[in-house]
Image (spheres, helix red, strand yellow):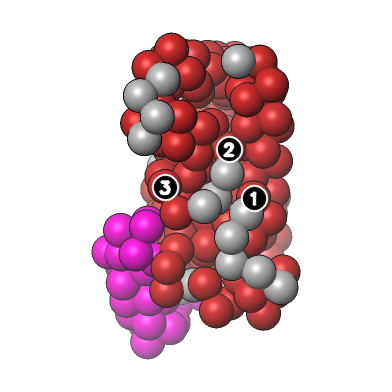
Amino acid sequence: MADLIVPALIETLHMVFLSTIFSLILGFPLGILLVITEKGSIWEKKQLNRILNGVINILRSFPFIILMILLFPLSRIIVGKTIGTTATVVPLSIAAAPFVARIIESSLKEVDRGIIESSLAMGASAGEIVFKVLIPESMPSLILGITTTIINIIGYTAMAGAIGGGGLGDVAIRYGLYRFQTDVMVVAVIVIIVIVQGIQYIGNKLSSKINKK
């Protein structure tokens, strides 16, 4: 059984790691823009804010499996194929990016408005407020949000296994469901649970440590 689980585990970690990186690259700036362009904020752009909200809401409305199928052509353009671990990173990243944007938006909005107004009174620019006030002040919440994002992506990878994405989800479905090897499915699920619990534990510890500082 190890010859099935270990390669699948490596594939899952590969997908999760790359998808987390790319979804943060896409979603983090979107989250910041959502906060600073809203009405009464430091860089008010109502039209841009409405467009961003609309796009993010539309992307978040798509079930992941449907979105993955729709993005097959993009996966083929970027990585040259539509099936497999690497190809799955493309739809995983795009599916997770709107979720990341909302997580970032929520975290940044927790920052005390008084701190922002004080920074503005001292002549801080929009960029300085974002990078020297909003992000540092919301770091504990951001870490918990990113932790939630990673766990969400792990769930996506399990679903991706249903349509050739590889990983633990693929093993659980292919051997546990179609070949009735229940033990393989149980082990795959246990490994996923352990990964999720480990990531949540690390995220909680980091957030708590930074919050104390």
Residue nearer the viewer, 51 or 181 = 181
The residue that mark 3 highlights is 162
From which residue to which does the magenta span run? 41-67
Contact between labelled residues 1 and 2, with CB atoms less than 8 Å apart: yes
Residue 73 location (% of width, % of height): 55, 79
The residue that mark 1 highlights is 85
Sequence-first disc among 2 and 3: 3
Task: Quote the CA–CA distance across marks 3 and 1.
Answer: 12 Å
Residue nearer the viewer, 208 or 156 = 156
Q: Residue at x 72, y 69 (%)?
A: 79
Residue 176 location (% of width, % of height): 40, 26
Q: Quadrant of residue 202?
A: top right
Task: Quote the CA–CA distance across marks 2 and 3.
Answer: 10 Å
Query: What SS does tag 3 mark?
Result: helix
Q: Residue at x 30, y 58 (%)?
A: 63
Q: Is residue 39 left or right of residue 125?
A: left
Residue nearer the viewer, 156 or 4 = 4
The amino acid type of the residue labelled 1 equals: Thr
The residue that mark 2 highlights is 167
Quarter of the image containing the N terminus? top right
Residue 76 location (% of width, % of height): 63, 75
The answer to whether any part of residue 42 appears in the image is no
Query: What secondary structure predominates along the stretch shown in magenta?
Result: helix
Question: Would you say residue 63 sits in the magenta stretch?
Answer: yes
The amino acid type of the residue labelled 2 equals: Gly
Q: Residue at x 36, y 35 (%)?
A: 178
Quarter of the image containing the C terminus? top right
Sort mark 3 into few (<14), some (14-19) or many (20+) by Cα contacts within 10 Å. some
Query: What SS does tag 2 mark?
Result: helix
Residue 134 location (% of width, % of height): 57, 49
